[in-house]
Image (cartoon, rainbow, N blue to C red):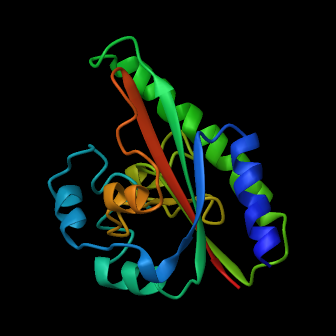
């Protein structure tokens, strides 16, 4: 099993993740304080996406769900910006991260080693251009919808540092983190 898991790290890097590591779920730092940032609408997606708070569910339920898993694949993508105010570059970086995330997720989903997986990425679910929540409809693609690591109360900064990955990757860069949890 360890060989299979290590192969996922290699595949993530081959698919353009900048950094990748295996994590132990029991060592993931959770904090309900991250939900407060969501409630303050710091990213602009609060109550605008099925996979974001409050519609994704209570933080205690999400943490409990995450803790049902054994291991995970943590990976980060780093994107160059023109300067620290390059909003368009940040959005392009997030879109590129989403493409890389979906490729890695597809590799994990196509492997029948795990009983269940829980994919988490950066920011709101971006599978649809416009979330069905905005028009009062149920999620169109529940099997493809993905919540964020922050919505699950994961302290991303502490998590990446614990596995030797820099949170800040230098001037004029933006970094995005994803985590795919596995039940063995």
Residue positioned most to the front: 164
Q: Residue at x 31, y 48 (%)?
A: 45
- Quarter of the image where the N terminus is located: bottom right
- Asked if residue 81 lies left or right of residue 140, the reply is left
Which quarter of the figure has residue 40? bottom left
Q: Residue at x 43, y 27 (%)?
A: 91
Q: Position of residue 32 (x, y in %)?
A: 22, 73
Q: Nearer the viewer, residue 174 or 62?
A: 174
Q: Position of residue 24 (x, y in %)?
A: 53, 77
- Asked if residue 84 lies left or right of residue 92, the reply is left
Q: Nearer the viewer, residue 81 or 158?
A: 158
Count the marks: how many? 0
Vertical arrangement, residue 82 with respect to residue 130, above or below? above
Q: Residue at x 40, y 18 (%)?
A: 88
Q: Residue at x 74, y 64 (%)?
A: 6
Q: Nearer the viewer, residue 12 or 148?
A: 12
Q: Position of residue 150 (x, y in %)?
A: 35, 60
- Asked if residue 160 lies left or right of residue 35, the reply is right
Residue positioned most to the top: 82
- Quarter of the image where the C terminus is located: bottom right
Which quarter of the figure has residue 73? bottom right
Q: Position of residue 82 (x, y in %)?
A: 39, 11
């Amino acid at each position: 099993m360890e060989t299979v898991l290590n192969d996922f790290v290699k595949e993530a890097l081959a698919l353009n993740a900048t950094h990748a590591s295996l994590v132990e779920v029991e060592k993931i730092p959770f904090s309900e304080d991250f939900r407060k940032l969501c409630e303050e609408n710091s990213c602009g997606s609060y109550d605008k996406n099925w996979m974001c708070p409050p519609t994704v569910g209570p933080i205690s339920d999400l943490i409990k769900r995450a803790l049902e898993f054994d291991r995970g694949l943590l990976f980060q993508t780093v994107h160059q910006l023109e300067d620290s105010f390059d909003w368009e570059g940040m959005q392009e970086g997030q879109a590129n991260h989403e493409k890389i995330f979906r490729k890695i997720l597809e590799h994990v989903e196509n492997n029948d080693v795990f009983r269940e997986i829980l994919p988490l990425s950066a920011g709101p679910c971006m599978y649809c251009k416009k979330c069905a929540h905005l028009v009062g409809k149920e999620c169109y693609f529940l099997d493809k919808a993905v919540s964020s690591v922050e919505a699950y109360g994961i302290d991303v900064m502490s998590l990446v540092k614990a596995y030797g990955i820099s949170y800040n990757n230098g001037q004029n860069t933006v970094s995005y983190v994803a985590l795919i949890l596995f039940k063995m």
